[in-house]
Image (cartoon, rainbow, N blue to C red):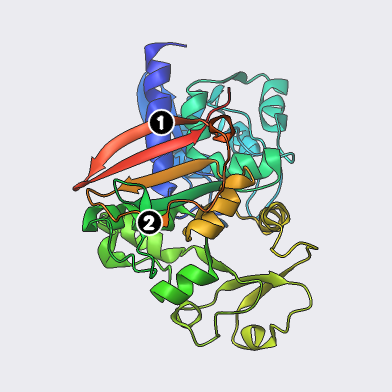
Amino acid sequence: MSLSDHAAMARALKLARRGLYSTHPNPRVGCVLVRDGTVVGEGWHVRAGEPHAEVHALRAAGEQARGATAYVTLEPCSHHGRTGPCADALLAAGVSRVVAAMQDPNPQVAGQGLARLRAVGVQVESGLLEAEARELNLGFISRMERGRPFVRAKLGMSLDGRTAMASGESQWITGPQARQAVQRLRAQSSLIISGADTVLVDQARLTVRAAELGLDEEQTELALSRSPQRLLIDSRLRVPVNAPFYQAGPAWLACKAGQDASAYRAAGHTVLECTDSRPHIDLHALLAQLAALQINEVLVEAGPRLAGAFAAAGLVDEFWLFQAPVLLGSSARPLLDWPLERLADGPRLTVIERRMVGNDQLLIARPSKE
């Protein structure tokens, strides 16, 4: 591929990122149309149910789309959903070449869109900046390829690896800039998970707050137009229906099958009944349920017990560790409630990003594949 091909796809990826907060449950996609070395149209997918990126770009290009090259960050769809197939729209517009960053992992597409274009003589290429395109849609890809959402765990800790005092007091370990970053992380998530302990102690709502997002007007509006779902794992129904978490708006509750959750349903909340013979809810089964409900990205904001359970089950795909320059002492609560007996039992992580957020350090790490 040429330098101009790379530049056009990089622009398409930049456009796709504008849908970071709003496309759920659809993937984030951008498209750029280039004819005779000039960009004649571009677009990005804004919301589910609305036109896809290719359609926006074709509308902007008009007749200039004929003979153009379409750079799209995800294979054009070939099936009828809430909108028509984008592969057909590109054909109707007379596009002569299509460059896709990656094939669509959705089994309803899975190469069929590119095959349809190739079959009628359109020059088709795939794989340009694929790694960047996959990073943009880790949750959608995870749901399609693994049958579960991509899970991030957000943890705030002191320099000595503690998350709260023994009493549970934890507000605020980290500073305002870190809290702003967490607000944006919430906004891009499909669903936020917490546990009864956190919600009871912190009186947590786990909502997205416009004033703390720190985004421009367009992105703030998009973020607020699609607030993430909020799910409380509460196997014993310890959190009352009049708690701030439930008063903040419709929420989801995960509890054991057979529990009397009628009061929560009556208040407008969604109850997910989870069957499990063990004392606690089966997190693997819960994530499979969430995937079936089209949840792409899950953010776990919980105390050491629930966060530790997700980590111990091998279900955390990415850790967001905010470390504040403070010491909480040996009686404070640990980062994760996850007993390990040998050094060899501790999973290794690969740091993918490290930066300062105000006076705090942010470490983003994923389980090593080695």
Q: Secondary structure at mark 2?
A: strand
> Percent x, y for residue 11?
37, 31
| Residue 342 in which image quadrant | top right
| Residue 27 in which image quadrant | top right
Residue 45 visible, this orientation: yes
Residue located 64% across and 55% down the image: 294
Label 2 sits on what residue type?
A: Thr
**Which one is in front, 204 or 73?**
204
> Percent x, y for residue 137?
53, 40
Disc 1 to disc 2: CB gap under 8 Å:
no
323 is higher (above) or lower (below) than 211: above
The residue labelled by disc 2 is 163
Label 1 sits on what residue type?
A: Ile
Q: For the view shown, which residue lies furthest in the top direction?
A: 2
> Percent x, y for residue 100?
55, 26
**Which one is in front, 104 or 2?**
104
Q: Secondary structure at mark 1?
A: strand
Q: Is residue 361 left or right of residue 246?
A: left
Give the number of the mark in front: 1 or 2: 2
Task: Give the number of the disc on residue 352.
Answer: 1
> Percent x, y for residue 173?
28, 58
The mark nearer the N terminus, 1 or 2, is 2
Q: Is residue 255 left or right of residue 311?
A: right
